[in-house]
């Protein structure tokens, strides 16, 4: 049914649950697996009116990017080990300096994925409305089917 599955993770316990489910599904379907983790850009505050902003130096940008790359590497190494444990290989991808939902949707399109597997934090009611969710954005803005794991 699905031949090319995109798994999304930020390294959290909740995301790990989604990855485990996606790996098991890929194994059962003998599907190709791509795993993506996305790191957002360093926030910059330019200020407004009389307020002073904060603009990081190049060294601060470089340290931030290095820390994101290292963190993403650890997340992807963990997923690689999970996949190898059940006997499948996975293409691992870190998308730096991007909005997660946008990067997930673009990755699914560019890699020809026919299913996205993501976890949901399980927030309900007003809290979900106020906090938003990358999963919700992918569901609303994407064109690839999404399996949400709770």
Image: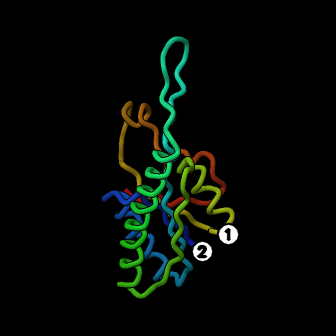
Near mark 2 (Cα within 10 A), the count class, few <14, some 14-19 or many ≥20, is many
When asked about the image quadrant of residue 76, the answer is bottom left
Picture coordinates of residue 96 (x, y %)? 54, 56
Q: In the rendered picture of this protein, how many numbered marks are placed on residues?
A: 2
Q: Residue at x 40, y 84 (%)?
A: 84
The answer to whether residue 144 is left or right of residue 123 is right
**Residue 51 circle label:** none
The answer to whether residue 81 is left or right of residue 51 is left
SS category of the residue bearing label 2: strand
**Residue 112 circle label:** 1
Depicted 66 relative to depicted 34: above or below = above
Q: Residue at x 52, y 81 (%)?
A: 29
Q: Residue at x 68, y 62 (%)?
A: 109
When asked about the image quadrant of residue 110, the answer is bottom right
Q: Residue at x 50, y 61 (%)?
A: 147
In this view, the residue in front, 63 or 122, is: 63
Picture coordinates of residue 32 (x, y %)? 56, 79
Mark found first going from the N terminus, 1 or 2: 2
- Here the colouring is rainbow
Pick out the residue farthest to the top: 50
Pick out the residue farthest to the left: 13
In this view, the residue in front, 9 or 125, is: 9
Depicted 32 relative to depicted 68: above or below = below
SS category of the residue bearing label 1: loop
Depicted 43 relative to depicted 68: above or below = above
Which residue is identified by label 2? Answer: 4
Near mark 1 (Cα within 10 A), the count class, few <14, some 14-19 or many ≥20, is some
Picture coordinates of residue 92 (x, y %)? 51, 72
The C terminus - image quarter:
bottom left
Residues under numbered marks 1 and 2 in contact, where contact means CB atoms less than 8 Å apart: yes
């Amino acid at each position: 049914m699905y031949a090319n599955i995109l798994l999304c993770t930020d390294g959290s316990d909740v995301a790990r649950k989604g990855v485990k489910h996606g790996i098991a599904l890929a194994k059962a379907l003998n599907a190709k697996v791509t795993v993506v983790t996305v790191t957002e850009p360093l926030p910059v505050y330019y200020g407004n009116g009389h307020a002073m902003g904060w603009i990081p130096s190049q060294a601060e940008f470089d340290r931030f990017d290095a820390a994101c790359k290292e963190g993403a590497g650890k997340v992807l190494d963990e997923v690689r080990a999970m996949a190898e444990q059940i006997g499948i290989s996975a293409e691992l991808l870190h998308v730096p300096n991007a909005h997660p939902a946008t990067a997930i949707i673009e990755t699914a399109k560019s890699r020809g994925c026919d299913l996205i597997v993501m976890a949901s934090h399980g927030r309900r009611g007003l809290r979900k409305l106020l906090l938003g969710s990358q999963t919700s954005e992918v569901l609303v803005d994407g064109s690839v089917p999404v399996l949400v794991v709770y």
